[in-house]
């Protein structure tokens, strides 16, 4: 007796994606395994590390704390969707490269999602506001310094939109 | 950490949600934001066979501020249980009518969890250190619960029974939280409030929290006071008796100190990995002093603002 | 703009974007969980709820009856079919396998493994496995564990002591007798670890046609393919580990040998690809990645003028219920046992003890961070005892810049350094007098504030000499690394590195070095990771060794390429080598610029024009370089003296902290780190790892602890209770660089991967204790949580009250 499957229809990075999923499939596992968008990472599966952050209807959320079925009809943006329309990395991603704001790369997609959401809402954040905005994204490699620098750089050069 | 298998449904109406709850009994759980429930399911500490998604029920999204603040009686601010924390955080009516809740919300989780978590979900989860629950108790909110047989009301102060255990029955749904909005203060009186907590890291569960809302007159007399402590007892502690004690005082250090001592006497904290019972008692006293001082200062600032404006 | 000491280089030391960042910022890393092999199945674990118990029976019928479940593996089967995993000390009766066999020794130990179509189904099945346990006696306190009569974690071993020895280097008793003063104290480095955001994961696939096991893993471990093969009873060339998997942080801990042997065994047996990604609970409880848990008892002998003559150090370390390399984490600090100080003699008694807790594994610094914490606490206490300034005391005892190479009592020679200058730079950057004034003003206003100073060594270059030091039966002295460089027909350069990377920027390191030697733009140089069958020998990025070893190997290989190009040019230009000039890949006669050959032309000759090749030169253009760590190859003397790591980086931390007097909550207000790792090849990368190391140190100092209940349960088993610092707990950090090149390395570089972590906890502890000193309080254990600080404050206030009443 296998598990019941539910139809899910989600817009992901501008494209409509449809699938049949179990109810318990989390949104992060749906993105990674069903849609093969492996840029979003699972670090703790209990909603604390933030590696799984994505934009849901434009707002940053933890995709490990949602089931895919709950996202039916919603619009999602993952790290893969933050590139420019020609496929080149966006301005925020470029800033991360300029300041070396990533080392192992595991927290990075979630961090960029959080930073992107911040700059959309607040194009000139203070250092305190930056740290608050990424306060729910844990990193073990960088000590956050170069990440804060990257977000400041992206803001300062007016590159508000990634 | 994958949840145990379950079936999922997203009813279009509240009545349907209640029918489903009644039908499935304790095997079913409601899910709104899921910020507390999903991690528990991931750890298989919760394993409902049915998950009933109420996050999109329009009936749970109502926000109704009092039309006009009455000078004679408290108003009521109604928040649908399904209203997301981020929505309340940004709502100017909430800021105007419920400044204490607005302050408390800054301490709730992280921005990302507030984008999904709901006002009602936080209350129903029953964590002893939850900020929204504390504010609901301190302001003497009324909770509306619904099931197939109809609607009941229960004071927030009677809703919390023990850590993680509330008075909600398995077949009930929390639908609305009605929070008293203090009557409009007279010309020489202003309100002030403060919320504070101690946690190990920013955004962690509070070890202990405290909040206070005061009405203070131009001479510095306390006209009205409400305060409470979270995390220092099996349930959030509203302290109305201490509020009455404070009314009529000048909120000087002696009065505040006496209030803090009395408050600590009413706590019954547990010890755990991060804080011993003694430490929690100590923090409770410190935080009550802090929020009373801060609320008084807030009221004085508002008074001066009134005079200036 | 160049960082200190790098002016003469073209690419080394210059600001440059890394090669790795572009894929990570676009979500195009390739981590083990991203690898989907067709037909792949998934593994979940059944873990022990008991700290110690006998396994009486395991029943899996209900589990196997579930749809999608393919196999249940127990210890009985696995232990009969595989070899036990290696242990770093001579303890043949302390056996370790991936699954428990007959007995469980810690809560969280893996008892059975389930294979199913999905991870969720595997977890469903794991729940249905019934295990009958007979709980047994257990011991959790390491001091009780070494007492006679304590419950034995491994009864056949006869005691709970895995290793114990008292080293005496120099005339310790004499120095103590002659010293004017002595003091004794204890500190406890609590159990924490570097806990990467990615857990350990491994995927394996057995190709029966080729008789080959392919392995993809999130790995940072020397000799991993060899150990896998050995355990699985396969020839070494029947295991192919793919080193091109991106590792989501390791900082020492991702050894994963038990995970890999388990999955490798199942993959071969079941004939389908398999993957195990630890979930966070499996990782915290049973991933065997906890760090040192060390009690230091220290005695210091010193004179009134502040000269520290001698130290006696007893280090009791709780490695948990099993051991791999963990006991050796007591051995590495031998190579820097006196820190940066001219201490004449040392007695060192390391004791590695087992208890019924999760097994310890290598953590960033391999034991040096706890040792530095103990040493710097000693310095601060000596200063307080004498009423002497902490900075002055350090400077008085520092090894001086003109004393290098400096031989310490335990037989290790420090290559170079200038500790006075680095400390001064840090103090200047912190504006030390102003910092003290801020502290004093806070105190005057009734607050608690403190400044902490720590001056610590970062041994680098990872020599394995603690292996023969702690186990005379193990005379391994080779600790090599390697690089292969190819220039292809089109003239493009590819460097091949022979191990995995976990965020250290090795591809950038190699490209920069190759570019430097060959004078070609590093942005045009590609660096790839070999797999273990095609790789040259490597010993992994451990012990801050890659800048030295991989950098040195890349330089060595590049020089061979350059020599080949010069030889081709000499042959074709009819000139002597001495007449030639190499410039950005072209070679010309110095006195006649018309006689030259371009890079393109030289490459063409190498690949296509055999008739133009000098006799004896290999066709094509490629070179390998494999070399031993500088100063390595030695065995310890009878009294345990040995050259440990070759190169010594140095860090000086200056920290301002305030403690909320009402709640005990600490807050870091200013953080400055002076850092000297010789020539920095990639400054952004070095700075990045230093910031990260300091953040790790902040976690170990203030927030992180693997706490156990009285019945052996890990209480901090998720991120709800194991508290990792966020951007709100880590302050802004200022790093100020200095460069004393190493005389032992190609460019003067020293290693730096463990920077920051090695000194931060010591500095923060110094600051917290400075803040508590006016209360007569102190704290001698990590982490210094608000509860721990407040408890000490309360005790001090009570003592004061008693004293004055």
Image: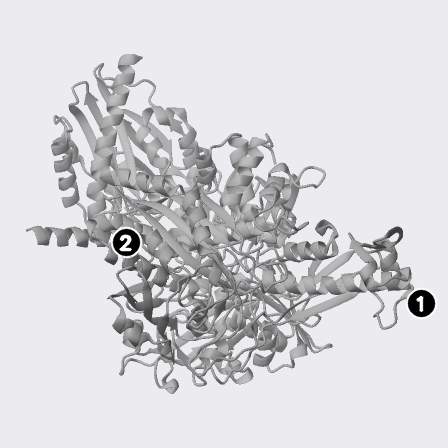
Above or below C688: residue A161: above
Secondary element under disc 2, as helix, strand or loop, is loop
Is the residue marked by circle 2 packed among few (<14), some (14-19), or many (20+) residues within 10 Å? some
Q: Which chain hosts label 2?
A: C
Above or below B194: residue C579: below
Q: Which residue is mark 1?
A: C611
Left or right: C110, with A150 as reference point: left
Q: Is residue A6 something one can see in this rendering?
A: no
Q: Furthest residue to the left?
A: C805
Residue C478 in the image: state x and y as whole percent. Answer: 59, 76
Residue B152 in the image: state x and y as whole percent. Answer: 29, 37
User: Which residue is at the front of the view, B199 or C611?
Assistant: C611
Above or below B230: residue C596: below
Q: Furthest residue to the right?
A: C611
Secondary element under disc 1, as helix, strand or loop, is helix
Q: Residue at x 63, y 37 (%)?
A: A91
Please state the total of marks drawn on the protein image.
2
Q: Residue at x 63, y 62 (%)?
A: C746
Q: Which mark is residue C280?
A: none
- Marks 2 and 1, how far apart at CA: 76 Å
User: Which residue is at the front of the view, C164 or C265?
Assistant: C164
- Is label 2 in contact with label 1 (beta carbons under 8 Å)? no
Q: Which chain hosts label 1?
A: C
User: Which residue is at the front of the view, C99 or C583?
Assistant: C583
Q: Quadrant of the C terminus of chain B?
A: top left
Residue C760 in the image: state x and y as whole percent. Answer: 41, 54
Quadrant hosting residue B136: top left
2 vs 1, front mark: 2
Is the residue marked by circle 1 packed among few (<14), some (14-19), or many (20+) residues within 10 Å? few
Residue C550 in the image: state x and y as whole percent. Answer: 63, 63
Q: Which residue is mark 2?
A: C388
Above or below B127: residue C677: below
């Amino acid at each position: 007796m296998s598990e019941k499957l539910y139809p899910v229809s989600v817009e992901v990075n501008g494209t409509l994606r449809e699938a049949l999923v179990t109810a318990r499939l989390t949104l992060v596992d749906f993105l990674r395994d069903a849609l093969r968008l492996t840029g979003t990472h699972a670090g703790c599966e209990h909603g604390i590390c933030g590696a799984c952050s994505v934009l849901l209807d434009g707002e940053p959320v933890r995709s490990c704390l949602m089931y895919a079925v709950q996202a039916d009809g919603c619009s999602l943006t993952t790290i893969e969707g933050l590139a420019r329309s020609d496929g080149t990395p966006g301005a925020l991603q470029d800033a991360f490269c300029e300041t070396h704001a990533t080392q192992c790369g595991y927290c990075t997609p979630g961090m960029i999602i959080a930073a992107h959401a911040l700059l959309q809402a607040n194009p000139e954040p203070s250092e305190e506001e930056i740290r608050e905005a990424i306060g729910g994204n844990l990193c073990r490699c960088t000590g956050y310094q170069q990440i804060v620098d990257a977000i400041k750089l992206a803001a300062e050069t007016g590159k508000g939109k990634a | 950490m994958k949840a145990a298998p379950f079936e999922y449904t997203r009813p279009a109406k509240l009545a349907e949600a209640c029918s489903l709850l009644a039908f499935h009994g304790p095997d079913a759980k409601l899910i709104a934001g899921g910020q507390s429930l999903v991690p528990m399911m991931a750890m298989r500490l919760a394993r409902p066979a049915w998950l009933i998604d109420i996050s999109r029920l329009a009936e749970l999204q109502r926000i109704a501020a009092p039309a006009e603040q009455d000078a004679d009686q408290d108003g009521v601010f109604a928040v649908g249980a399904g209203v997301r924390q981020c929505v309340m955080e940004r709502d100017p009516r909430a800021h105007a009518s419920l400044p204490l809740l607005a302050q408390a919300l800054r301490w709730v989780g992280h921005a990302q969890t507030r984008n999904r978590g709901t006002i009602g979900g936080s209350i129903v989860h029953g964590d002893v250190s939850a900020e929204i629950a504390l504010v609901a108790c301190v302001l003497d909110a009324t909770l509306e619960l619904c099931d197939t047989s109809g609607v009941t009301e229960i004071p927030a102060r009677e809703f919390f029974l023990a850590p993680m255990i509330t008075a909600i029955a398995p077949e009930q749904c929390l639908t609305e939280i009605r929070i008293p909005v203090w009557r409009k203060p007279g010309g020489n009186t202003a309100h002030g409030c403060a919320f504070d907590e101690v946690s190990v890291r920013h955004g962690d569960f509070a070890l202990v929290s405290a909040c206070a809302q005061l009405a203070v007159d131009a001479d510095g007399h306390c006209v009205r006071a409400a305060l409470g402590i979270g995390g220092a007892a099996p349930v959030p502690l509203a302290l109305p008796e201490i509020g009455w004690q404070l009314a009529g005082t000048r909120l000087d250090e002696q009065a505040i100190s006496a209030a803090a001592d009395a408050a600590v006497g009413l706590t019954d904290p547990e010890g755990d990995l991060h804080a011993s019972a003694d430490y929690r008692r100590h923090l409770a006293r410190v935080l009550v002093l802090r929020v009373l001082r801060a609320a008084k200062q807030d009221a004085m600032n508002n008074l001066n603002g009134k005079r200036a404006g | 703009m160049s960082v200190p000491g790098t002016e003469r280089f073209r690419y080394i030391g210059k600001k440059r974007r890394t090669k790795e960042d572009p894929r990570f910022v676009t979500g195009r890393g390739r981590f083990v969980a991203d690898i989907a092999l067709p037909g792949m199945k998934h593994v979940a674990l059944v873990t022990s709820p008991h700290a110690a118990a006998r396994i009486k029976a395991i029943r899996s019928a209900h589990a196997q009856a579930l749809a999608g479940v393919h196999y249940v593996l127990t210890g009985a089967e696995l232990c009969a079919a595989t070899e036990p995993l290696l242990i770093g000390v001579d303890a043949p009766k302390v056996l370790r396998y991936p699954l428990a066999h007959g007995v469980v020794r810690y809560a969280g130990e893996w008892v059975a493994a389930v294979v199913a179509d999905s991870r969720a189904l595997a977890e469903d099945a794991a729940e249905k496995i019934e295990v009958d346990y007979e709980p047994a006696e257990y011991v959790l306190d390491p001091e009780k564990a070494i007492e006679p009569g304590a419950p034995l974690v491994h009864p056949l071993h006869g005691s709970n002591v895995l290793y114990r020895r008292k080293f005496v280097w120099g005339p310790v008793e004499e120095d103590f007798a002659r010293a004017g003063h002595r003091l004794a104290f204890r500190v406890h480095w609590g159990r924490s670890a570097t806990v990467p955001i990615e857990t350990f994961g491994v995927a394996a696939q057995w190709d029966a046609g080729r008789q080959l096991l392919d392995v993809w893993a999130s790995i940072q471990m020397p000799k991993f393919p060899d150990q896998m093969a050995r355990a699985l009873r396969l020839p070494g060339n029947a295991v192919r580990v793919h080193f091109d998997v991106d590792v989501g942080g390791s900082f020492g801990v991702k050894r994963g040998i038990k995970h890999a042997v388990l999955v490798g065994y199942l993959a071969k047996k079941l004939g389908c690809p398999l993957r195990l990604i630890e979930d966070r609970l499996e990782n915290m409880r049973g991933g065997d990645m906890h760090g040192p848990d060390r009690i230091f008892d220290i005695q210091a002998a010193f004179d009134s003028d502040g000269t520290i003559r001698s130290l006696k150090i007893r280090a009791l370390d709780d490695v948990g219920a099993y051991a791999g390399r963990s006991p050796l984490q007591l051995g590495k600090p031998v190579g820097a046992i006196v820190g940066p100080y001219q201490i004449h003699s040392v007695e060192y008694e390391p004791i590695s003890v087992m208890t019924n807790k999760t097994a310890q594994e290598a953590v960033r610094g391999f034991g040096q961070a706890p040792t530095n914490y103990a040493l710097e606490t000693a310095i601060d206490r000596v200063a307080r005892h004498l009423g002497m300034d902490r900075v002055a005391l350090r400077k008085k005892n520092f090894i001086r810049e003109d004393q290098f190479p400096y031989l310490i009592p335990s037989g290790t020679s420090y290559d170079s350094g200038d500790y006075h200058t680095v400390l001064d730079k840090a103090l200047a950057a912190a504006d030390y007098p102003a910092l003290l004034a801020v502290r004093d003003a806070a105190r005057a206003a009734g607050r608690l504030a403190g400044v902490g100073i720590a001056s610590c060594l970062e041994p680098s270059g990872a020599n394995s000499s603690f292996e023969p030091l702690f186990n005379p039966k193990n005379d391994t002295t080779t600790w090599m690394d390697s690089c292969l460089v190819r220039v292809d027909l089109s003239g493009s350069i590819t460097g091949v590195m022979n191990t995995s990377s976990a965020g250290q920027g090795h591809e950038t390191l190699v490209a920069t070095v190759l570019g430097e030697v060959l004078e070609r733009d590093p942005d045009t140089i590609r660096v790839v990771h070999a797999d273990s069958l095609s790789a040259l020998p490597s010993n992994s990025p451990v012990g801050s060794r890659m800048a030295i070893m991989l950098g040195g190997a890349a330089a060595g290989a590049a020089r061979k390429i350059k020599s080949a190009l010069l030889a081709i040019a000499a042959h074709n230009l009819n000139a002597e080598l001495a007449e030639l000039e190499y410039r950005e890949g072209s070679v010309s006669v110095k006195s006649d610029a018309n006689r030259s050959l371009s890079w393109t032309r030289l490459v063409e000759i190498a690949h296509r024009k055999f008739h133009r090749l000098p006799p004896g030169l290999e066709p094509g253009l490629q070179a390998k370089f494999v070399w031993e760590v500088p100063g390595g190859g030695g065995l310890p003397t009878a009294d345990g003296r040995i050259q440990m790591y070759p190169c010594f980086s140095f860090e000086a931390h200056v920290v301002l902290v305030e403690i909320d007097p009402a709640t005990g909550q600490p807050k870091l207000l200013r953080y400055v780190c002076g850092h000297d790792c010789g020539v920095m090849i990639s400054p952004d990368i070095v700075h990045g790892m230093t910031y990260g190391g300091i953040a790790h140190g902040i976690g170990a100092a203030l927030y992180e602890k693997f706490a156990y209940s009285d019945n052996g349960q890990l209480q901090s088993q998720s991120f709800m209770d194991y508290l990792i610092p966020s951007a709100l707990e880590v302050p802004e950090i200022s790093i100020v660089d200095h460069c004393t090149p190493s005389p032992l390395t190609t460019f003067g570089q020293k290693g730096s991967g463990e920077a920051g972590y090695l000194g931060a906890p010591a500095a923060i502890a110094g600051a917290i204790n400075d803040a508590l000193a006016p209360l007569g309080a102190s704290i001698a254990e990590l982490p210094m949580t608000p509860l721990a600080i407040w408890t000490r404050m309360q005790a001090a206030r009570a003592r004061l009250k008693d004293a004055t009443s």
